[in-house]
Image (tube, rainbow, N blue to C red):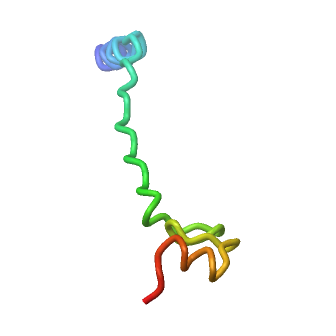
Amino acid sequence: MKSALLSLALLLLFACQPPSPKKKTAEKPGVDPKILVSCEGIGEIKVTDTYEGLKQKFGAK
């Protein structure tokens, strides 16, 4: 009988605890657009860029 009452008291003790405050998670740092790889392109070079446009933007080697 004592163990049942003790178990019930412990259960009530833990059940009546106030919810803990939610911790804010650290935000992930953003990705540098110069190294971003996406479906639209790689970094500053996009799929829609033309050869002439790239020559003007970055120069020819």
Residue 49 at x, y = what percent?
A: 65, 73
The one nearer the camera, 48 or 11, is 48
**Left or right of 52: which side holds 36?**
left
**Left or right of 15: which side holds 56?**
right
Q: Quadrant of the N terminus?
A: top left
**Left or right of 42: which side holds 14?**
left
Q: Quadrant of the C terminus?
A: bottom left
The one nearer the camera, 44 or 20, is 44
Q: How many marks?
A: 0
| Identity of the residue drawn at 50% across and 67% down | 43
Q: Residue furthest bottom?
A: 61
| Identity of the residue drawn at 30% across and 15% down | 6
Residue 36 at x, y = what percent?
A: 48, 64
| Identity of the residue drawn at 47% across and 79% down | 59
Residue 11 at x, y = what percent?
A: 38, 18
The one nearer the camera, 17 or 35, is 35
Residue 19 at x, y = what percent?
A: 41, 16
| Identity of the residue drawn at 65% across and 69% down | 39
